[in-house]
Image: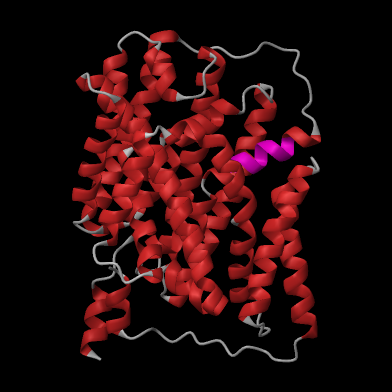
Amino acid sequence: MASVVHLAERRPRWIQRVGPWVGIGTGPGALAVGGALVDRFSPPALVGVILVGGLLLAALATAQGWVSWRRRQPLAAQAEAVFGGFGKALNLAMALGLLGWLGFYIGLGGAMTAHLLGLPDPLGALLLTALLAGVAGRGVDRWNALAGWTAVAAVLTALLVFWRVGVTWPAPPWHAPRALDLGVGLTQVVAYAIIFALRAGDFTWDLEQVEDVWKVGGVLYGTLVIFMGMGALMGWTLGRWNPAEALAHTPGAALGELLLCLATIAPALSALHSASLATSALLPVPSAFLWIALLGGILGAGRFDRELLPFLDGLGLAMPPALVVMLFHEWVPYELSPFLRAVAWLAGAGGALGLRCLAVPFPMLGGMLIAMVILGTGAVGSKRIRTRNTAQPRAEESGRSTH
């Protein structure tokens, strides 16, 4: 009992876990998504898309963070609890998706590093990879503060661009957006961090109070709205959505490149941490973060950041149904088999892909609804009500899960 009390006293507060949330909300990817949407929407319509899409994304992340806090389980353990043996498929998908995000940030930050030092892009990516691996090896509690501080660099990056070139946006009259455009816009905003929404529990499961979960979720929403809005202004002003390319065409590009390189560190560390947890759940690999960092560095050296939007589109279709299944499992008391939950996830992902191929609006929402229908049908036919176990996990299990 004494060890349990001692563990509870050492649980972190929200300020010790807010770094990854700030890093996602202020990452260069948030600027990029806002800038990429300017061709589809007028200013008023884009404000609405960012506000609504950001709220949906933050709500999903906060809900998943609450579930992990309540269960005292990070994502890797939660996936196996919900899907049984099929949880390995989700952990594999998570590891691959997070590896892609890591490659995006290393490619972007590595290019800035290379330009500053006069090196080829691949060498810049490898230098940044070595830095990330060294910092990540110190543990999440150690690099949380660094993630928060480097996120400030993203603020300075955007402000530098606006100070150098000013701000412009399309003049009225503004046309009402089409339903298809709205569907695509909302999908891209939510898809931007849908992987983070799934793994949000990795940064909340051991928080001290439930209010801490709501606080980090609120920080995510606020930063998302601000930075996607800044990205939109950057797109209208410069005609480019990639902040690296935008800064390369502004006076004082060297300072902007330095700030942008620093801004990639927070979300890259967040992706590296969760990818390592997902990989460790699949394979007993010692120092998994080193292998993930190496693979991310290889992707970054190949400038994976230039393939952002197709990558986001694929994630936005495949991952939300899995999140729906996990939240349904927590909130609906009927007992369903792990196989049925896996079928709901895969059917939802496949349905979303089919809807996109047919150019049906809101394909991501369609995939989530398909998963809900399958789960709801199973719940109606189920005669077993699950007995909830809200007991705290043993101290030694909690201690193992943090690493």
With 271 as the anchor, is 349 left or right in this view?
Answer: right
Query: Could you tell me residue 249's position as x and y percent?
Result: 40, 11
Query: Could you tell me residue 44's position as x and y percent?
Result: 68, 26
Magenta: main secondary structure: helix
Q: Is residue 218 magenta?
A: no
Quadrant for the C terminus in the image: bottom left
Query: Could you tell me residue 338's position as x and y percent?
Result: 61, 79
Residue in the picture at 32% in, 81% down:
397
Dividing the picture into quadrants, the one containing residue 371 is bottom right
Q: Nearer the viewer, residue 249 or 63?
A: 249
Dividing the picture into quadrants, the one containing residue 339 is bottom right
Residue in the picture at 64% in, 13% down:
170
Residue 382 vs 403, above or below: the answer is below
Quadrant for the N terminus in the image: bottom left
Query: Could you tell me residue 391's position as x and y percent?
Result: 43, 87
With 254 as the anchor, is 23 left or right in this view?
Answer: right
Instruction: Please give the range of residues in magenta.
Output: 182-189
Residue 185 vs 2, above or below: the answer is above
Residue in the picture at 63% in, 31% down:
47
Q: Nearer the viewer, residue 216 or 267?
A: 267
Residue 330 vs 264, above or below: the answer is below
Q: Nearer the viewer, residue 361 or 237?
A: 361
Residue 343 vs 24, above or below: the answer is below
Residue in the picture at 42% in, 73% down:
73
